[in-house]
Image (spheres, rainbow, N blue to C red):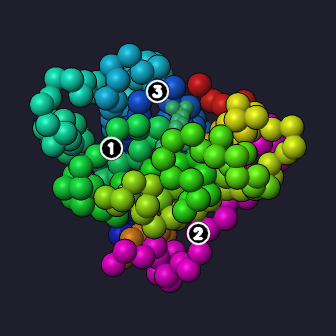
Amino acid sequence: MSPSPEAAAGQRLRVAVLLSGRGSNLGALIAARDAGTLPIDIVLAASDKPAAPGLALARSAGVPVYASDRRRFGKRSEFDADLFEQVRAVDAELVVLAGFMRILGARTVRAWQGRMINIHPSLLPLHPGLHTHEKVLAAGETEHGASVHFVTPELDGGPVIAQVRMPVRKSDTPERLAKRLLPLEHHLLVSVVGLLAAGRVCLEQGQVLVDGTPATTPLVVEVPKARRRRPAPR
Ligand code: GAR
């Protein structure tokens, strides 16, 4: 598939990032944008946690922020409607869930299907939900990783676009796995957003297309050795 007309015309993808915590994945997107290697504009960073460090990071990088608070809204649908009104107001073309820990309603997700991705710290379909590093160790697995997938109403269940993989060591703890995986996650997320910005990946009838061809398995993103060791951008 050739890139979308917008990508071919050199237009930058307008990206909104939703987060609930630290925001290191947002930091990786900002760093790649600033390095000129990712043709995106980050038009909004929004959070369900007004005190999320990721929002402070966004502010310091000049990214517009929106902080919501679930407790202000009676129903989940009202929270979603308020949040996505902001996303629409900035004309976002892609929504990236980067450590956004609140479940969005099916109606919201369907409205953004094919235009919303999530990064998850496991080799999906293994270990959806929380505590993925603990689950990998408890299952005695020898490999761990992270996935970026299109968001569907099923939690962590949408079509997987790409993954990074790494071996599990005998000495690993959940904390060590999380620390070693994080720079790989950053590389994965930047790579996938780059493919979307170039119009090379899309969702059609529930299937991931890469360069116009249905992908039968997730892309495997290789991470250069230097990047595996690089501390998480903040
Ligand atoms: C990342 O490890 C991401 O994979 C995970 O939250 C962390 C956010 O880190 N997401 C999930 O667990 C979603 N199910 P960050 O705030 O530093 O980007």
Query: Does the stretch in magenta take in 91?
Result: no
Residue at the spot of label 2: 218
Q: Position of residue 149 (x, y in %)?
A: 47, 59
> Closer to the camera, 114 or 21?
21
> Does residue 14 appear anywhere in the picture?
no
On-image quarter of the C terminus:
top right
Cβ of mark 3 under 8 Å from ligand 1: the answer is yes
Among numbered discs 3 and 2, the one appearing first in the sequence: 3
Please name which of the two marks, 3 or 1, marks the residue nearer to the observer: 1
- Callout 1 environment at 10 Å: few (<14), some (14 to 19), or many (20+)? few
Decide: marks 1, 2 in contact (CB < 8 A)? Answer: no
Q: Position of residue 147 (x, y in %)?
A: 57, 55
User: In the structure shown, which secondary structural element does the residue marked by tag 2 occupy?
Assistant: loop
**Magenta region: which residues?**
205-229
> Closer to the camera, 157 or 181?
157
Q: Residue at x 21, y 23 (%)?
A: 71
Residue type, numbered disc 1: Ile
Residue at the spot of label 1: 103
Please tell me whether residue 125 is drawn above or below residue 128 in the rendered image. Answer: below
Q: Along the horizontal axis of the image, is 183 left or right of 109?
A: right
Residue at the spot of label 3: 21
Q: Residue at x 81, y 42 (%)?
A: 226
Q: Position of residue 67 (x, y in %)?
A: 28, 24
- Callout 3 environment at 10 Å: few (<14), some (14 to 19), or many (20+)? some
